[in-house]
Image (spheres, helix red, strand yellow):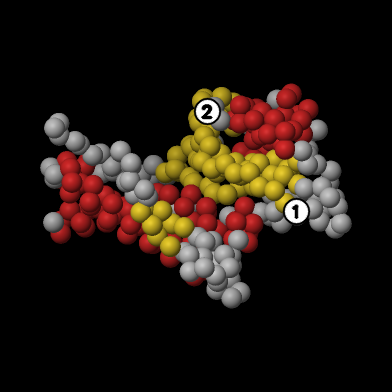
Amino acid sequence: MAAVSLIVTGDKEVNRRLAALEPKLQKKFARQATRAVAKKVAQEAKGLTPSISGRAKRTFKVRAIKRKVGVIGSQVIAGADERGGDSPYYLKFLELGKEGQPALKFLRGTLYDRANRWQREFEKELRRFIVAA
Amino acid sequence: MSTILAAVRDFLESKSAIRQLSFGKIFYDRAPEVIAKPYILITVVAVNRFYTLLNEADAASIVVQVDVWHTDTNEMEKLAEAIRLAMSGTQNVFWGNPDAGGRYVFSAKILREDVNADRPQDGSDRWVYNFSRDYDITHREPVPTH
């Protein structure tokens, strides 16, 4: 089988050290790093979420993206109550707006406004996993 | 930020298909309390500026949410598609009026899209439909040289 090189960051040093690892380890570290960053994203988004009872905030979860060829990573899910309770469906309306109600965009703002920061965090986490190996 | 928003609006208004389908009703952030549909609502979601080592670079990126509100799903899709065809995939094009804060746009791409339906309100039997897309627009932003 041909060697697989995984270029995931803009940091040459991290790319070089990552390329020296086995493909299986490359994927493992990249997956762990995305999960660590996704947890931070979820934490920050939670802090920005408007809250009265705290029900919406309790629905923030980090999940692995379903693995496909060439795709690994983690996602932040909010607004779905997996324990069978009433889902805070209104989270979508708060985020995207409704007729007569402007969008609050606190979830997308967390991602888009701080895109550079999350990329740096990813590189930092990835470096941490590589050094620890 | 406000000038790139004006550039987005001017650009959309300059497209005859969009102007006809929306009757020229394009608003920022919130629509007037009483307004007949259809209309287009533009909301800023995020702004990212780029920097050199020493200073601000002459480029910025803005994420805007462009919502189409309509009472007819077919017409809503037509209008949303006209906007997509005008904005998405834009490369190195000038948007808006050069004399009134228009902007040179390097790229514009869709980040998210979604369709929603709002229940009839106030005894009405009319559902309201909403086609929502987020566009990431990277554009040239003048920087003072003093």
- Determine crowd level at label 2: few under 14, some 14-19, many 20+ residues with C-alpha closer than 10 A: some
Residues B48 and B80: in front is: B80
Question: In the rendered view, does A14 fall on the left or right side of A119?
Answer: left
Q: Residue furthest front?
A: A84
- Chain under callout 2: B
Which element carries disc 1, helix, strand or loop?
A: loop
Depth order, front residue of A27/B42: A27
Kind of residue indicated by mark 2: Gly
Give residue A71's position: percent from left, percent from top.
33, 42
The structure residue drawn at horizontal position 62% and vertical position 27%, both measured from the top left corner, is B86
Query: As drawn, is A132 to the left or to the right of A94?
Result: left
Q: Residue at x 21, y 42 (%)?
A: A15
Residue A32 in sight = yes
Q: Which residue is mark 1?
A: B119
Element on which disc 2 rests? loop
Report the residue marked by disc 2: B89
Please provide percent x and percent y for residue A63. 38, 57
Tell me the quarter of the image containing the N terminus of chain B.
top right
Give the x, y percent position of residue B99.
Answer: 68, 29
Asked if marks 1 and 2 fall on the same chain, the answer is: yes
Q: Percent from the top left, x then y, of residue B69? A: 73, 43
Q: Note whether A76 is above or below A9 in the view shown.
A: below
Q: Is residue A19 above or below residue A85?
A: above
Q: How many marks?
A: 2
The chain under label 1 reads B
- Which image quarter: residue B39? top right
Query: Which mark lies nearer to you, 1 or 2?
Result: 1
